[in-house]
Image: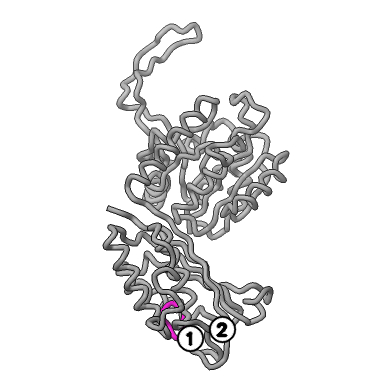
Amino acid sequence: MNAAVVVAAGRGKRMHSAVNKILTPLCGMPVIVHTVRALADTGAFDGGIVLVANPDEMDRMQEIAVRYDLPVAAIVPGGAERQDSVLCGLKACPRDTDIVAIHDGARPMVTADVVRKTLESAAVHGSGVAAVPVKDTIKHADSRMNVLDTPRRSEYYAVQTPQTFRYKEILAAYQSGNSGATDDAMLMEEMGMQVHLTEGDYENLKITTPEDLILAEHILKKRKAHAMENGLRIGHGYDVHRLVEGRKLILCGVEIPYEKGLLGHSDADVALHALMDAMLGAAAMGDIGRHFPDKDPAYEGADSTVLLDRVVDMLQEAGFSVGNVDVTIICQKPKLMPYIEQMRSCVASHLRCSMEQVSIKATTTEHLGFEGEGLGISTHAVALLTKG
């Protein structure tokens, strides 16, 4: 199990701002939102993400987490020094954590590739610390700025985060009380542990000054433009159908044994309808009502998997292919867990992709609303398409 600790308990005095730097807006959202989402989007942290906040800013951080729906397992107060804060975060991780990545809250530009390399190294060697070769010649000087020597530049690296370790080892190191280390890796070195570096990224900068914030915004905009140039398109779909007697219940192309089914012009597969709308929306091709109108007799009782095939054909003709899809079915009854894998397999076959690209989830509303009262079923779907 992998967990992450995001250290955001400092004050960022070098930003010359009354606002903590991790709360400073970056492309319309606080820096910390970008940082947490960058880690969460890797999908690598099944043990969750622990956010360590300044004790004076706990309420503010909780508000941000709710407002931006941050996928954090816990928000805990930090200590007086960074080491104290990291220890607070480590203690909040699940006890069965195998690997933990420690990351600065002020590094919002970290990529999935950088994170992956540190995790892989830690799994093999016990540590994986992101680092980049220094670009400038390094001079070793005394207090009067007199050069003492010039070390070989090729042997020196600028260390970044995440700094990733076996959980039990880094926790023991922090619990030892050693206060002389300036980063996680140095603490492990002082404990006699061999530290391994992994390939970092020059864009994985730490926001420390106002100039860093300007550069980070430029990088984010550049990445967004690059994604658009490479045809990444996202769409959202939503659909709802009433439950009635005398109808089959079809969800994601799978017939579910139940006393009621969904009412509709076609087979009323609410999950596939939402998915098709998400895919059509990502390609800016309208919705299923435009392509398969419910007033047309040709679609009466239609199998939604056949309609999905036609949507996929349209997308492929326009140069799109499926990146991944995520479908959330909302109903109180019946329980859908036994059928999820069959649904994923069916959807993947019609999307002409692997099951790893298809996520299907089911949830209840705790008996609230029309879904909770058993009157109907609704579905949300998100689709990522690639072009070219």
Q: CA distance from mark 1 to mark 2?
A: 8 Å
Q: How many marks?
A: 2
Q: Of the two numbered discs 1 and 2 on the same chain, state the one appearing first in sequence.
A: 1
| Left or right of residue 339: residue 58 | right
The image shows residue 40, relative to residue 23, as above or below, that is below
Q: Is residue 354 visible?
A: no
The spot of residue 21 in percent (x, y) is 60, 33
Residue 151 is tagged as none
Q: Amino acid at mark 1?
A: Ile
Classify residue 300 as left or right of residue 106.
left
Label number found at residue 256: 1
Whether 136 is drawn above or below 204: the answer is: above
Contact check, label 1 and label 2, Cβ < 8 Å = yes
Q: Which residue is mark 2?
A: 334
Q: In this image, 216 relative to 332: left or right?
A: left
Q: Residue at x 50, y 9 (%)?
A: 143
Q: Which residues are magenta?
A: 250-256
| Residue 151 image point, x, y percent | 34, 19
Left or right for 352, reference 179:
left
